[in-house]
Image: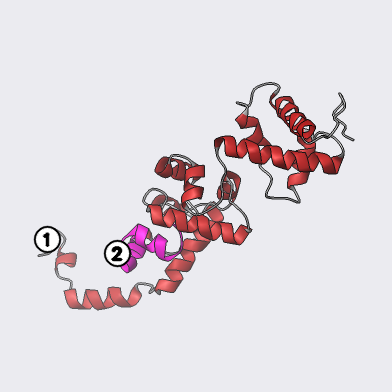
Amino acid sequence: MPRKSVYRAVADIDRQALAEFQAGIRKRYTDEQILAELKQSAERLGRSPTMREFSADPKTTVHPQTVIEHFGSWNRAKRKAGLVPRRFATREELLALLEELGKELGRVPTARDIDEHRGKLPSKSLYWHTFGSLTNALREAGFDVPVGEERLERALEQAVRLSKRLGRLPKFADWTEARKTDDSLLTEWQIYRMFDARRGAWSTFQFLVRERLREAGVEVAPDGTIS
């Protein structure tokens, strides 16, 4: 039962007439229009918007409460718009998004890729929190992601091939340049981290590459050139 107003003018309002007036004056939005506004706001923000961010977006015309009235909850509306809620995504949703990103890129997604696709994907920290690491999430999503000794072995195999192509042991800059045309290469920073990113990490990697080349019968000069 509505509370009695202290103002006579309000108390005397014809409730049915008021309801009809309100129904006519309110702007009506279709579900499609609301979802489009959510997507556009996410694109402007570069991430999936919170209710406060959506409300503060000067280019939105829909009130967050209207979104909730249409879809039952804010997070349900964002899911309908293809925007996974930043804190409430399920494991299955997180894995499905990784799979979709991998198909779009044509390779295994990296942490940088996730950052560059914020708005479509939640933050990489949510993957780490949910799966323990991004590597675990990628492997669970079906990607071939080497870990530990397997990763180092792959890096050495890649470095041996690159060395033969260059005619010398690869420098950091060589590796960076090679990755521009070969996404299968581990990133130079992944290699650095295998050696705890300490001083001399890259030269330690080069030493292991030299040893692998020598085992294959390839001569490596002191300056790193091979013959």
**Is residue 221 shown to the viewer in this render?**
yes
Decide which of tag 1 and tag 2 comes sooner along the chain. Answer: 1
Q: Which residue type does callout 1 highlight?
A: Arg
Considering only vertical position in the picture, is 215 above or below 178? above
Would you call the spot at circle 2 few (<14 residues within 10 Å), some (14-19), or many (20 or more)?
Answer: few
* Residue that label 2 marks: 72
The kind of secondary structure element at disc 1 is loop
- Which residue is rendered at x = 48% and y = 55% of the image? 57
The quarter in which the C terminus is drawn is: top right
Considering only vertical position in the picture, is 13 above or below 48? below
User: Magenta residues, as a range?
Assistant: 65-84
* Residue closest to the eye, 159 or 87: 159
The kind of secondary structure element at disc 2 is loop
Instruction: Check contact, mark 1 vs mark 2: CB within 8 A.
Output: no
* Residue closest to the eye, 21 or 77: 77
Going by the image, does 64 lie left or right of 36?
A: left
- Which residue is rendered at x = 40% and y = 44% of the image? 130
**Is residue 89 shown to the viewer in this render?**
no
The quarter in which the N terminus is drawn is: bottom left
Quick check: is 16 in the magenta stretch?
A: no
* Residue that label 1 marks: 3
